[in-house]
Amino acid sequence: MTPNSKHEPQCFLCARSLRRVGADFTGKQIYKCDHCEYVATPISTAAETIALYDDPEYFDGWGCNLEFDYDRFEPSVHRQVQDYLDFIGRHTQGKSLLDVGTGSGLLPHLARANGFEVEGTDLSKHVSENVPEKAGFPIHHGTIEEIQFTRKYDVITMLHVLEHTSNPLSTLKRCKELLNEGGYIVVVVPNYQSLDSRIKDFLSAFKLKSRPYKHLALGHHNYVFSINSLEILGEKSGLQTIHRQTQQPAWRAGWWHRFLERYGLATWCWIVYRKAT
Ligand SMILES: [Zn+2]
């Protein structure tokens, strides 16, 4: 989608017309590409986006704290980041890592303890000014398209980031430029095709939810992707998809959750792209 598109918005991946699904409880319009299997909402202005992520309070939830005191983060947060690190260990190679939209910086902090050389990026001034001093690694301020990098990386991670960007295609292409030959990009986003999302979509469409489409978190999320849309996105960026799966958050991991994962119905999409050598 393009900023504030009014009529007949087109899919940024396949150029087909998007279908209007409805509006969420705040009035945000929802458009879907049935071919690529994702939904999108007209993008907010850059100024609104910066104001949203610059607010330090944004980082005070999610089991983290404003002081970036990692030992005091909730155990569930540590467990989730450990899951990401185990996954990175299984599916990638190399020892330099750039974490795009790093937030608290816990992932690079723990990756460094595992022998990685780490850097991060973030849109938030609060993060880029405070985390480096506290954690001891650099954080570049801004979008990945704007930042002037002086080096390349073996692994780039974007965990819960791509759905917030205004142009996922330019973001992914920029990541590819910043990779060493044969390097990897690990992306985690909410799964539009999850069972949870399908049920809530159905209830929203039939006006059976008090706050329709709240689960899409539009306003924060400009896009809600599926594995299919992520694969197309990789293809359009000139990247090879080497692994994909859906997975539940670490704190929800019983037999029922493994069942959802087996059928691609779990809450999050995890995908690994590789830059061909
Ligand atoms: Zn499409």
Image (cartoon, grey):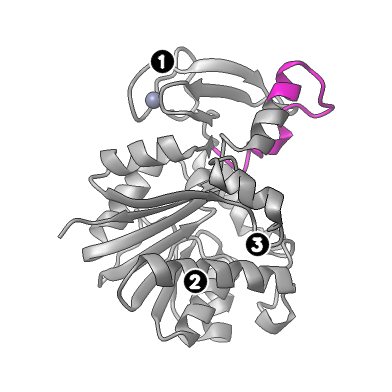
Q: Is residue 195 above or below residue 125?
A: above
Span of residues in magenta: 202-222
Give left or right: position of 47 versus 211: left
The quadrant holding residue 167 is top left
Q: Residue at x 75, y 26 (%)?
A: 212
Q: Is residue 19 above or below residue 171?
A: above
Residue type of the residue flagged with mark 2: Asp
Quadrant showing the N terminus: top left
Quadrant showing the C terminus: bottom left
Q: Which mark is residue 17?
A: 1
Residue to which mark 3 is pinned: 250
Q: Which mark is residue 86?
A: 2
Between tags 3 and 1, which lies in front? 3
Lower sequence index among marks 2 and 3: 2
One can see residue 263 in this view:
yes
Q: Residue at x 52, y 30 (%)?
A: 40
Residue at the far right in the pictured view? 210
Residues at marks 2 and 3, CA–CA distance in whole angstroms: 12 Å
Q: Residue at x 26, y 49 (%)?
A: 240
SS majority, magenta? loop
